[in-house]
Image (tube, helix red, strand yellow):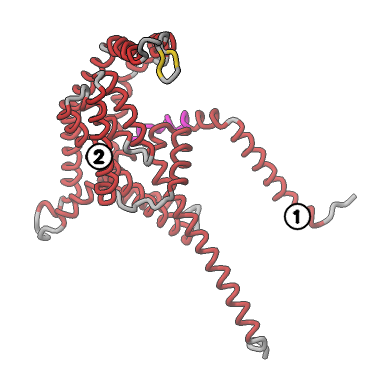
Amino acid sequence: MKLPKRFRTLWLPLFIFAAVIVVFYKTIDRFPDVLAAVFQFLGLFSPIIIAAVIAFILYIPQNKIEKLFQKLKEDNYFRKHSRGISVLITYLLLIIAVGLLLYFIIPAIVSSVANLVKNLPDYYNNTINYIKELGGSDGKIWGVDVTNVDKWISLDKILSFLDFSSINIYLGEIAKFGNGFLNFLLSVVMSVYMLSSHENLIRTCGRVLNLVFKKRTLHAVYSYIARGCEIFYDYLYSAFLDAIIVSVELSVALSIVGIPYAILLGIFIGLFNLIPYFGAIISCVVTVLITFITTGNFVTTLITFVVILVLQQIDANLVQPRVIGNSVGVKPFYVLVAITLGGAMFGFIGILVSVPAAAFIKTVILDYMKAKQQRENAAAAAVSNTDENPTENVE
């Protein structure tokens, strides 16, 4: 029996479509395994990826410094060697920033965390006693018996959230620190070359892509890469600047109020401020709870809550509009969806980059819809012209 011609011409596209559906289903069905395999493969190129990330982050300050030197006279030594000097200054500034961080901030954080863990049993006992005192003679708060509250939230249950059974794994990771440090140094050296000759790298990538894509497609790819980089730069730099401002403000304010672990809590709030919308709420609740546990003073806790609330409102209404502005332009619902997906797939890094990624995806979709609408309008206009002049092309 001879198959119809239409079927003979469609069997290959149908087969490819079915194969794609099967592969897509298997990928979704075993997504964690697929993701783990992808990360394992990318781990082979981790020094190159880390170098590219470092060069990507440092490009903006390096480019600004280079432009300052290029404004000098043509025969000036600094203008002739603006690229190398700007790269050198950028990395010197990075080394100074990391040095200040390691000398001032990290020891304060480590000391605060160590004291918090050391005093955790005392804070626990004080909190339990305070709750029992609130129960009064009948031992009830709002009808709830709190005489056995120490059994509900025992210290053992709290410590059970910390997986100390994996301490040998952590020690093994520490033993690998030497190898990781060498890879990081290699990445830094590679990032210097990437930053110094990024035009050549872009030109080489363009030549390779030109073998696969048409010029029109390649131009669109370049355009989207440039716009994506602009979105990521604008958002990430402004978000980190805002987080630093919030950390400094709250560290100083909480220190003035006399809150224990003020620097640690200030940095914690600033870090969570990178998460849009509910990051500030989570950090505020946790900070107020820790303040109450460590001080046992309701008035001090209330003052802490008011200070955080006031500074967060100042940041949301005065600082963020000027620092971050409208660099994203994504509605809150889509931001929450992006944060949820990014955090589930890639952890905190996924949460951090999910918002600019959502903005980039929105840009691509809007451009596609705009181009499609223009094609439809052009087709409709062509049909309209043909209907109005039916004999135009008839000789």
**Residue 218 higher or lower than 92, as above or below:** below
Residue for badge 2: 310
| Label 1 element class | helix
- Nearest to N terminus: mark 1 or mark 2: 1
Residue 13 left/right relative to 170: right
**Residue 381 higher or lower than 236, as above or below:** below
Which secondary structure dominates the residues rendered in magenta? helix
Name the image quarter holding the C terminus: bottom right
Within-10-Å neighbours for mark 2: few <14, some 14–19, many 20+: few
Q: Amino acid at mark 2?
A: Val
Q: Amino acid at mark 1?
A: Thr
Q: In the image, what residue occupies the spot 18% across and 46% down?
A: 86
Residue 266 seen from this side: yes
Residue 163 in the image: x percent, y percent?
41, 14
Span shown in magenta: 39-51
Please tell me which residue lies in front, 307 or 200: 307
| Label 2 element class | helix
Q: Quadrant of residue 394?
A: bottom right
Residue for badge 1: 9
